[in-house]
Amino acid sequence: MERRTIVIDPVTRIEGHAKITLHLNEQGRVEDAHFHVTQFRGFEKFCEGRPFSEMPSLMARICGICPVSHLIASAKACDALLAVRIPPTADKLRRIFGLAQVVQSHALSLFYLSSPDLLLGMDADPASSNLFGVLAKNPSLARDGIRLRQFGQQIIERLGGKRIHPAWIVPGGVSEPLTVQNRDAILASLPEALAIAERTMEWFKGTTEQFREEIASFGNFPTLFMGIVKEDGGLTFYDGKIRMANAAGDVVADGLDPARYADYLGEKVESWSYLKSTYYKPKGFPDGIYRVGPLARVNVADRCGTPRADQELAEFHELQRTAVLSSFHYHHARLIEILYCVERMQQLLTDPEILSKHVRAFARPNALEGVGAAEAPRGTLFHHYKIDEQGLIRWANLIIATGHNNIAMNKSILQVAKHFVHGERLAPGMLNRVEAVIRCYDPCLSCSTHAAGQMALQVQLLNAAGEVLDEVVRG
């Protein structure tokens, strides 16, 4: 019997274009799987020759979903080039900006992309597995998702002047201070956002019992987990040191300097994808597999540091005596982080210094190399720049969260496909589960490959001779 292949193209309800190939053995069982990122953009290359001061605004154009994350990491790299300490108020304002970004992005992922799976079921008709289907079955849930994303976007607009690609974060700080009117307006909106997060958490926890089979097979395997933590081990999105924990929940590396990421992280290019794969160097490739993002952050952090989020984090860790391993629980972790972000914004906005007018440090370049790191919604983000004496970018390297998760995503689709895909044709429920495990990671493919063109998802089923037996294309 010949080896066969199934192709899913494009993968749907993700941010970007990709395809999946499932390889069957002679007995018709899945033996291998690949997640192909089929777009390429080249931001690292075409920023060469630009003044370093343009980089935050330019890098925000990498993505329309998480421009703030790129603004922050890029500006921190530029702060390193200037060799300055930004004013304390600028630090706090950047943090608020980033927290609002996390809320709106997590809301997009959970409500717009994944709630159809959670509310309607994995076997639902693909024609209704979207936000409109959610609206028809549970109008309040859909409205909450739309409102929560709007909440985050409105804060970004109040601080940065616009919701998409704001240029407010600059080398040395931010360009404008916070006004009393905007502070009061943001504070007034926090209780509604917190209430939405709390009732969504209760709804989500009530759905998990029906997904036992998915929880058991959706990326449920031992890996390392990586995230930035505060000095006290607390959850953070803006600044701190890198921590690595293993599947048992034990810390295997702590206090790693983000600026020295190349000492402990390796990057590998595979012939079948434009997305780089990163790995933990001490364990090599591919054994150095690790995960980043919400699940990783709540696995490596000792605490969140806000009351409601810490309460939910404690309950979350009751799911498993070790680190929580199933990638299905990325959804749960996102909700914990939304609670944290809203509570943390409350703390920062009531700080007496938050209205200070001193929000930017000015300097000429004092270093020829700088690294900026932050936690984007999808995981740890690195921007690394080298400049010449005139301050022009001569080299740039970006490591995006989706790249950190690349090995894990490929292993996850293999696990799901082995469990759910049988025979030579893709039934809708099989196809959706293969896609749904990717949606757990919420990959942002435009960010991670740096490609112009239409995004689509393709899944192919190949036989032992490499011939396409079945193919599904969306987009």
Image (tube, rainbow, N blue to C red):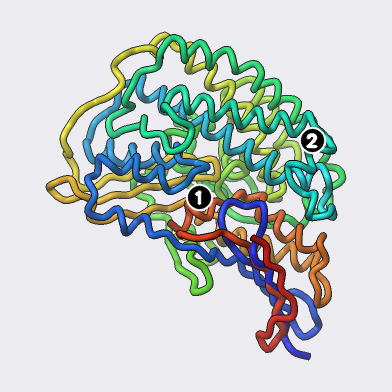
Image quadrant holding the N terminus, namely: bottom right
| Visible residue check, residue 220 | no
Residue at x 41% of width, y 45% of height = 61
Image quadrant holding the C terminus, namely: bottom right
Residue 449 in the image: state x and y as whole percent. Answer: 46, 58
As drawn, is 305 to the left or to the right of 263?
right
Question: Contact, CB < 8 Å: mark 2 with mark 1?
Answer: no
As drawn, is 463 to the left or to the right of 341?
right
Compared to residue 235, the image places residue 181 above or below, namely above
Residue 129 in the image: state x and y as whole percent. Answer: 77, 49
**Rendered image quadrant of residue 222:** bottom right
Q: Which mark is residue 401?
A: 1
Label 2 – label 1 distance at C-alpha: 26 Å
Residue at x 67% of width, y 62% of height = 474
Q: Viewer-proximal residue, 113 or 381?
A: 113
As drawn, is 37 to the left or to the right of 27?
left
Q: Amino acid at mark 1?
A: Ala
Label 1: which secondary element: helix
User: Count the marks: how many?
Assistant: 2
Residue at x 64% of width, y 42% of height = 109
| Visible residue check, residue 44 | yes
Within-10-Å neighbours for mark 1: few <14, some 14–19, many 20+ = many
Compared to residue 173, the image places residue 11 above or below, namely below
- Residue lying at the far left in this picture: please name it: 389
Q: Viewer-proximal residue, 11 or 324?
A: 11
Q: Return the residue at label 2.
A: 205
